[in-house]
Amino acid sequence: MKVLRSVISIILFLFVVSLSFVNSQERKLSICVTAFDDLVYGGSNYAVPSFISSKINESSNFYTSVFYSQYRKSNLPEAMAFAKQNSIDLILTGTVKQSEVYYDYVTIPSPWGGVRIKNVTVTITFEVMLYSVSNNQLLLVRDFSHSETSTNVGGWTFTDWGRIDVNSQEFRKTPVGVVLNKAAEKLVKALDQEYQQIKNSVNAQEKKVEEKKQGMIKKQNLVLWLLQKYYWKVWIKIGTI
């Protein structure tokens, strides 16, 4: 019996600990990332947000993300309706403001006539707007940018955004991939830093909706209670007329 009690005690202890662990975990907020507006053209309005969505899933401790290319800033109300129907917490949209690839050739003198080296400077800037789906509130507006020069890139040449897979490991090794990755890292870091405030905003609206729902339920229950309480009295009174 003592052994059985000990086993049961251990099982109950582990069960309580597991419940505490589950309850201590923060719920990840879900993000619908839309296509961006594009001031530079060339397909970056799809490639950049697609990469951002993957980066959020890869690096963030507090968010999950899916890229929906059929929505963008210009049709945000449709994206909002879709997000509400699918219980998504946040919408992230924006604009690609700068996407520059500048080549520079340098000749290094040598006894054999010199060596020509190709360098490339990449600059990417995008504006991000983060909305709460529950109340359409704008929670964050900020530019994220990174610029970096890669030396001696050999025969590498950037064609256009539409011809590359931005989520491939090969792309991340290219000068453009390196810069976009670092710009996206800045965004994810900012989102994580603002998580508590963003979560509070989402939860506050959810609480209002739930309170309104509970208020309606209480009213409905009161009406049912009154009907049940006075149904027979009304029925009897009618029967005596």
Image (tube, rainbow, N blue to C red):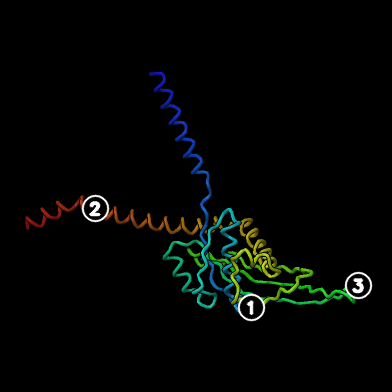
Q: Which mark is residue 226?
A: 2
- Mark 3 vs mark 1, CA separation in Å: 35 Å
Q: How many marks?
A: 3
> Which quarter of the rendered picture does the C terminus lie within?
bottom left
- Do residues under tags 3 and 1 come within 8 Å of each other at their CB atoms? no
Is 72 or 141 nearer to us in this picture?
Answer: 72
Q: Which mark is residue 88?
A: none
Is 11 or 199 nearer to us in this picture?
Answer: 11
Q: Farthest residue in the front direction?
A: 112
x and y percent of residue 229 in the render?
21, 50
x and y percent of residue 141 in the render?
62, 68
Left or right position of 15 against 179: left
Residue at image location 60% in from the left, 65% down from the top: 168
Residue at image location 76% in from the left, 68% down from the top: 150
Q: Earlier in the sequence, mark 1 or mark 2?
A: 1
| Crowd tier of the residue under label 3, counting other residues whose Cα lies within 10 Å: few below 14, some 14–19, many 20 or above | few
Q: Is residue 77 visible?
A: yes
| Crowd tier of the residue under label 2, counting other residues whose Cα lies within 10 Å: few below 14, some 14–19, many 20 or above | few
List the residue tagged with mark 3. Answer: 110
- Mark 1 vs mark 2, CA separation in Å: 70 Å
Quadrant hosting residue 197: bottom right
Is 101 or 173 nearer to us in this picture?
Answer: 173
Position of 109 relative to 52 (above/below): below
